[in-house]
Image (cartoon, rainbow, N blue to C red):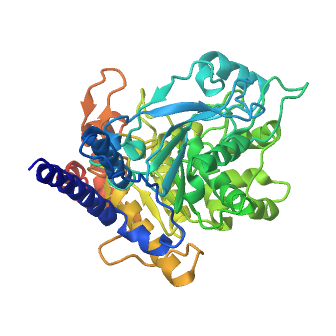
C-alpha cells in the first residue's frame, strides 16, 4: 500500500512536469521549430533511486525542472533588475566612475531587450560642468541604486508588457552625455571622457557570457538621446556579434523620441547652453568634443559633416538592420530646442504655424519608414511609461504595432533567410501608424495634460484655449461652424 501511494505521488509530480512543459512549449512554439537542432535546453536530471526515503529531494528536483520549463514561475521570486558594473574598468562614465547595466535574466527565453536611457547631452566644458553640478546621475555612477524596477516595455508584468515581459531585460544607464556616440578616453585637454558607444559594446560582450550567445532576437531600444543612440549603434552591435561568431542573432532597433529634425529655430539664440542651442550647432560642437563614431555608410555619405547622422531621417535610410520608430508629432524636446515654449503667454500666430509645420515635416520624414508609430500628442518618451499601452493611433496600440512589426520580420526571414526583410504583415495587423489630425493632443488617447501652475488636468479645449487657440478663426479656415469644430476637438477627431 505504501508503495502504491508513493507511485501515485510520483505520477502526480510527473503530471505537473508535463503540464508545465505543455504551457512552455505553447509559449515558444514559434521559436522552437527553427532552433531545435542548435538548442541545448538546461537539464535537471531526476534521480528515481531511493525515492521512498527521500521524497522531499525528489519533489525539489521536479520543482526545478518545472521552473526551467516555465520561466514565469520564477518571475514571482524576483522582479527587479540588478546592477552590474562593467568588468572592463577602462570603459567609464564621464567622471571616470565605472559604467554598468541593470539586468533581469529570464531563464529559457531566447529574446533579449537592451534599453538605452535618455537624458540629453553636453557639448563643451562649460555645458558639461553645469550638467555635472545639476544632473550628476547622468555623468557618474557613484549614486546609482543597486536595483531598478522596469516599467512599460521593461515591465515583467504581462498585463503591462504583453509582448516582451518574459524576455531577458537589460537597462543601461546613461552616463556619457554624448547621445551614446563617444569613443574617446580622457585627455589633458578634457576633464571628461565620452564612451557611450564603447559602453554599449562592452555591455553586449558581457551579456554573451550570460546567455546572449544563444539568443534568437536582440532588440536594442532607447528613448530620447537613447533613441538616437539606437540609430547610431544598432548596426555596430550587429557587426560586433557577427565578428564574434554569433551570426544567428537577429538584431533590431526600437527608437523612441529620438527622431529629431535639424530645422531652424523659431527665433535664433546664442549657443550658450543645451536648452537654447539649436540641435545642428550643438551636434556640430559635440561630435568633435565626444570623439563620436557614426554608422559607416552614413559616415561615407556625409564625409566631413557626420553631424547629419544624428538626425533620424538622414541616418535611417543608411542602416542595414530594421528599426521601428516611435515619435510624438509634437515632441516637447524638439519644441524646446526650437524655442517654442507652450506655457505662460499664449503662442503667437507665427508660432502656431511653426507648430503645425513641425507635425507636417515629421510626417514627411516618416513616410518611408516601414515600422513606425506617431501620435499627434504633445509629449516626450513613451516605451517605458506605465501608460504606453493606452496610446493608440487609428485604433491600434503601440505594443500591438510592435507585435505586427515582429511578425512581418519573421515572415521576411522565412522567405529571405537571415536578412530581416520586412514584409506586409497579416491583414488587421498594421505597423505603419501616423495621426493625420493637425493640432497637439487632437488624438483622444494622448496622455493627460496638466496645468504647469496648478497641476490640474486640462481638457483639449482648455489646453488649446490656454495656448491662445482662436476657435472662431480656425473654424473659418477649415470651412465649418465653430460649434462643429469644438465638438471635433472634444472627440479628438
Q: Nearer the viewer, residue 285 or 84?
A: 84
In the depicted view, which residue is nearer to us: 446 or 264?
446
From the viewer's perspective, is residue 196 above or below residue 320? above
Is 154 left or right of 475, judged from the image as shown?
Answer: right
Q: Residue furthest top?
A: 133
Residue 404: quadrant of the picture: bottom left
Does 205 sit above or below residue 367?
A: above
On screen, residue 178 versus residue 55, left or right, reads right
Q: Nearer the viewer, residue 366 or 194?
A: 194
Q: Is residue 208 left or right of residue 15?
A: right
Residue farthest to the bottom? 415
Q: Residue furthest left?
A: 1
Q: Residue at x 55, y 51 (%)?
A: 211
Q: Name the residue rendered at 59%, 23% in the picture.
A: 137
Q: Residue at x 35, y 46 (%)?
A: 64
Q: Position of residue 326 (x, y in %)?
A: 47, 54
Residue 23 location in percent, x, y? 27, 60
Q: On screen, 493 above or below 155?
A: below
Amino acid at each position: 500500500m505504501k508503495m502504491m501511494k508513493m507511485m501515485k505521488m510520483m505520477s502526480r509530480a510527473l503530471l505537473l512536469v508535463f503540464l508545465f512543459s505543455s504551457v512552455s512549449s505553447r509559449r515558444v512554439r514559434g521559436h522552437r521549430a527553427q532552433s531545435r537542432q542548435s538548442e541545448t535546453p538546461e537539464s535537471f536530471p531526476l534521480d528515481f533511486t531511493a525515492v521512498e526515503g527521500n521524497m522531499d529531494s525528489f519533489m525539489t528536483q521536479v520543482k526545478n525542472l518545472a521552473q526551467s520549463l516555465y520561466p514565469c514561475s520564477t518571475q514571482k521570486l524576483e522582479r527587479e533588475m540588478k546592477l552590474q558594473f562593467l568588468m572592463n574598468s577602462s570603459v567609464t562614465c564621464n567622471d571616470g566612475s565605472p559604467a554598468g547595466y541593470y539586468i533581469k535574466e529570464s531563464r529559457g527565453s531566447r529574446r533579449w531587450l537592451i534599453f538605452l536611457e535618455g537624458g540629453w547631452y553636453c557639448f563643451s566644458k562649460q555645458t558639461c560642468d553645469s550638467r555635472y553640478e545639476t544632473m550628476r546621475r547622468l555623468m557618474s555612477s557613484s549614486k546609482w541604486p543597486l536595483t531598478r524596477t522596469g516599467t512599460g516595455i521593461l515591465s515583467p508584468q504581462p498585463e503591462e508588457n504583453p509582448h516582451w515581459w518574459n524576455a531577458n531585460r537589460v537597462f543601461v544607464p546613461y552616463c556619457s552625455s554624448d547621445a551614446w556616440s563617444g569613443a574617446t578616453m580622457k585627455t589633458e585637454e578634457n576633464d571628461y571622457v565620452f564612451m557611450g558607444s564603447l559602453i554599449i559594446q562592452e555591455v553586449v560582450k558581457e551579456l554573451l557570457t550570460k546567455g546572449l550567445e544563444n539568443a534568437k532576437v536582440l532588440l536594442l531600444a532607447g528613448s530620447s538621446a537613447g533613441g538616437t543612440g539606437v540609430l547610431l549603434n544598432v548596426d555596430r552591435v550587429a557587426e560586433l556579434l557577427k565578428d564574434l561568431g554569433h551570426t544567428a542573432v537577429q538584431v533590431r532597433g526600437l527608437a523612441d523620441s529620438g527622431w529629431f529634425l535639424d530645422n531652424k529655430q523659431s527665433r535664433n539664440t546664442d549657443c550658450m547652453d543645451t536648452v537654447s542651442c539649436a540641435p545642428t550647432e550643438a551636434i556640430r560642437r559635440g561630435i568633435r568634443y565626444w570623439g563620436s563614431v557614426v554608422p559607416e555608410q552614413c559616415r561615407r555619405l556625409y564625409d566631413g559633416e557626420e553631424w547629419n547622422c544624428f538626425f533620424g531621417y538622414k541616418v535611417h535610410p543608411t542602416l542595414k538592420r530594421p528599426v521601428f520608430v516611435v515619435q510624438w508629432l509634437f515632441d516637447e524636446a524638439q519644441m524646446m530646442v526650437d524655442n517654442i515654449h507652450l506655457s505662460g503667454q499664449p503662442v503667437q500666430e507665427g508660432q502656431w504655424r511653426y507648430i503645425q509645420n513641425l507635425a507636417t515635416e515629421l510626417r514627411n520624414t516618416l513616410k518611408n519608414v516601414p515600422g513606425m508609430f506617431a501620435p499627434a500628442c504633445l509629449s516626450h518618451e513613451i516605451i517605458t511609461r506605465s501608460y504606453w499601452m493606452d496610446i493608440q493611433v487609428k485604433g491600434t496600440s503601440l505594443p500591438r504595432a510592435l507585435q505586427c512589426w515582429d511578425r512581418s520580420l519573421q515572415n521576411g526571414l522565412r522567405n529571405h533567410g537571415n536578412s530581416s526583410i520586412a514584409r506586409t504583415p497579416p491583414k488587421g495587423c498594421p505597423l505603419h501608424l501616423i495621426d493625420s489630425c493637425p493640432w497637439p493632443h487632437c488624438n483622444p488617447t494622448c496622455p493627460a495634460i496638466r496645468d504647469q501652475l496648478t497641476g490640474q488636468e486640462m481638457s483639449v479645449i482648455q489646453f488649446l484655449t490656454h495656448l491662445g487657440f482662436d476657435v472662431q478663426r480656425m473654424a473659418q479656415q477649415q470651412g465649418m461652424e465653430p460649434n462643429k469644430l469644438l465638438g471635433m476637438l472634444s472627440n479628438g477627431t
